[in-house]
Each structure stands twice: as C-alpha cells, then as structure tokens.
Image (tube, rainbow, N blue to C red):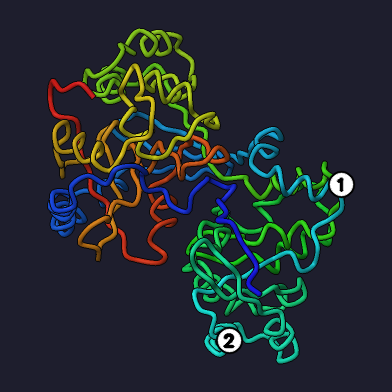
Amino acid sequence: MATSNPRRTNPRNGTSSDRPTGSPGKPKKRRAVWLCLGILLTTLTAASLIAYQTGKRDWAASSEHEVTGPWGNLTYTDIRLEPAANRIREAYPDLLHTVQTNYIADDSRIWFFDTTNRNAIKDILAKTQLPAHLLQQTLDSYAPTNCGNLTKGSLKPTQTAILAIPPQTRLAFYNELAKVNENVSFQDPYRFNGTVEEWFNDNNLPAPTMEIIRRLAVPIGNYMALYDIETILSGITNEAVALNILKNVAAMKTYLLKLRIDKDSDIQAIDTYWSGFNRRKDIYPILESLRNKGDTVRLDVAHLLPYLPRGRLYTYPTKPRNCHWASLNFFRDEPTPEIPTNAEIESDVTQKYQQVFDPPRFGDLLLLLAKNRSSNNLLHSAIYLADNFVYTKNGLGPNLPFVYMTIDEMKGIYDVSEPVIITRFRLKPNVQP
C-alpha cells in the first residue's frame, strides 16, 4: 500500500529557488528581453567584470583590509551572522517539537524518487558506492508513496547508511535527489563560504554532532554545504542544544564596510560617488565634518546607503522578501509591498534602466543570468556598492538576511550547476526608481 506524503517546503527559505514568484508575464516578450541580455555577454565580460578588480588593495597582517578607488579608502573585515533563536523556532517548529518530545528517529529521513521501478532506484542508489550490506538494507526499505496525484518510490535510509556515503559521491547523489520535487531539503542546502571549522568555530557543539557535520559537509565551489538537518540533529533531546546547532547551521559570512577619512581625503569625489550621482541625500556635510577633524576616522558605509537598505542591513525579514525586492527597492523611499513578479521585474528593467559597460558605480543593478538558457534565465540580482562588494539577499525566507557579499561569493552560489553571466544596468537619468 502506498503511503501519503504532503508536499513539504524548505524551512531555510520557504522555496527552492531565489527566482521571483507570481505571474510569469507574457512568455514571448520575456524571452526576448532576457535573451537580449545574454547576447551582450562578450562585451560585458571584457568591459565590466574586469572593472570590479581595479581597486588598489592593502593586505595588512590583520583581519581588516583596505582597498582604494573612486569610492575612497574602503576598509573591510568579514563577520559571521546567524539568526536569533526566535527565528529558528519559527522556521523549524515541527523539528524542534520532535526534539523536545523524544528525538529524531533513525529511520525518519525519506528519499523520494520519480519512479516506482525498484531496479531504476537501485541503479541510482548504486552511484553512492555504499557498502553492499548498507545498499541492500536501504533498498529493503522501499515503499511506494502517494505524493499528490502521483505515486513515487521512496527509501528510508538509516543514519549509518547516510554517513557511510563516500565524500566523492555524496554531492552527485544529492544532486540526483534534488531533481525530485519532494526532496526539498536537497534543493537548497545551507552554505558557508569557508571551512567547516570556520563555519562552526568555538560554538560548543557536542563532539558527536561536529563529527556528523564534518562527514556530511560537501564542497560546492568555494562553499561548504550541508543538506541533511535531521541527521545532524539525530539523538539530540535538548531543545537548547538543538537551537544552538540550527543557529550555527544557518550562519553566514558577511562584512563590515567602512570608509577611512582623513585630512587628505578627496571628499568631493567621495560625495559624488556615494551620493549615487545626485540620486539621494546630501552626504557632503558629514564627510566634511570628519575630514576637518584632522584625525583618521572610519565612517560605517551603512550611513551612506539610502534609507531602505540602511535600515535592513544585517536584519532578517518579517515578510517574504528576496533579492529582486531588495534590488529594485534600493533607491525607493517607500518599498513595494510584495516581492516583484517576473513581469514587474521586466517592466522595471526595460523602462527605468539602461545597460552599461563603463566602470561600475554605486547603485548599479547586477543581474545574474543562466548563460545557456533561452528563457527563464534570471537567477539573482544585487546592487553594486564598491570594489567587489554588493548589497543583496540570497533567497526568499526569513532565515536569510540582507547583507554585503563579494561578487565572487555571490556568483559562486549560482555557477556551480550551470554557467552564469553578470549583466549590469543603471537607472536612466531623471527617472525615479
């Protein structure tokens, strides 16, 4: 008899994609617009991407670094940001309830397959290179499962089997699982741009949990990724410990950005750059005040941002928000109430922006496109700040904050499975955002 499985959502971000939701607009028109962006790849790569690296860098023997350019003397240091406990409780109520009432059972994980053919499932599972006895044990757990109007094959692997998957085959197998809609947790893993030790540094996690994390973590480009939260929490019965684990899993790397101002700073040039070329408030008075002090001072870049991103930087949203909402509302005093649809993004970009190839400026809109797709190729968006830094939000959900990232880090999230190109746009003169 087939068991029933309701469609689950990813507690990480409520969806498996950073693409906007809602009406897709007119397919033919959208294809023409976005395909046109892809045609400009060669010119853009030569003219724009190189320009991101024009700053003069000072790599001091400390955690703070400095890069000089038209933005002034920009200092930066990386920090680690994690959601508060109440956010974790909101995102994982069922999981934490299970921890409180008992513990996560060894056979609670389910792998779904789009076929009910056991031989086909065996062929997929064989790619894991599991030892023969664990392979057979996992296949013995097979059951047909009702998923909406469809019946799909499912397996219930034990923790021993999950941990026994060799590192060299784990990611490829997880990518196979990610193709099935019901395997939500495999479609958008937690990522951290650094090593496992940097990700979970000095956070007093139980030693057995850290060993499980090391065995489950897989490299994706420059990131380490974790998929199977249930396995990480297996055997945990204390809610405080579970919360600490989940807070660490959800942590991400971002930056503190500051401008170094001294008596020799060209505040007129700095004002021109960070004022968005007369698109926002006058920042000259504060720059002049700091220069006239005579001493070297550091001004947090957050004070130079427009009202909306300044208030949301390093925070977690209380309503559904994604990268496109953050980007298109960057210069607006009043944000749009909902995340934009594909049609609204297309309308904004075509009517209010123009594609540019000169050196990037503060406030430029960056669009990440899938290079080899002829339609539906918009993957992500961000706002260029200075040097290699952008302002963005990676994903839809409440556990993903508004942050600074480098362009390389942002691109590294999306270009693992398919080639990605970056196109750059700027608001047209005298056009309101």
111 left or right of 131? Answer: left
Mark 1, other Cα within 10 Å: few <14 / some 14–19 / many ≥20: some
Report the residue at 40% width, 67% height from top: 417
Q: Quadrant of the C terminus?
A: top left
**Percent from the top left, x then y, of residue 172?**
52, 75
Q: In the rendered view, would you say 422 is above or below 294?
A: below
Query: What residue would you read off at disc 2?
Result: 118
What type is the residue that disc 2 sits on? Arg
Q: In the rendered view, would you say 191 is above or below 22?
A: below
Report the residue at 52% width, 31% height from top: 317
To which quarter of the image does residue 146 belong? bottom right
To which quarter of the image does residue 46 belong? bottom left
Report the residue at 40% width, 38% height from top: 67
Query: Which residue is situated farthest in the front direction here?
Result: 1
**Percent from the top left, x then y, of residue 330?**
34, 27
155 vs 5, nearest the viewer: 5
Mark 2, other Cα within 10 Å: few <14 / some 14–19 / many ≥20: some
Query: What residue would you read off at disc 1?
Result: 238
Secondary-structure class at tag 2: helix
121 left or right of 50? Answer: right
Tag 1 or tag 2, which sits nearer the N-term? 2
In space, the residues marked 2 and 1 are separated at their CA atoms by 38 Å
Secondary-structure class at tag 1: loop
Q: Nearer the viewer, mark 2 or mark 1?
A: 2
What type is the residue that disc 1 sits on? Asn
**Percent from the top left, x then y, of residue 272?**
25, 21
5 vs 392, nearest the viewer: 5
To which quarter of the image does residue 354 belong? top left
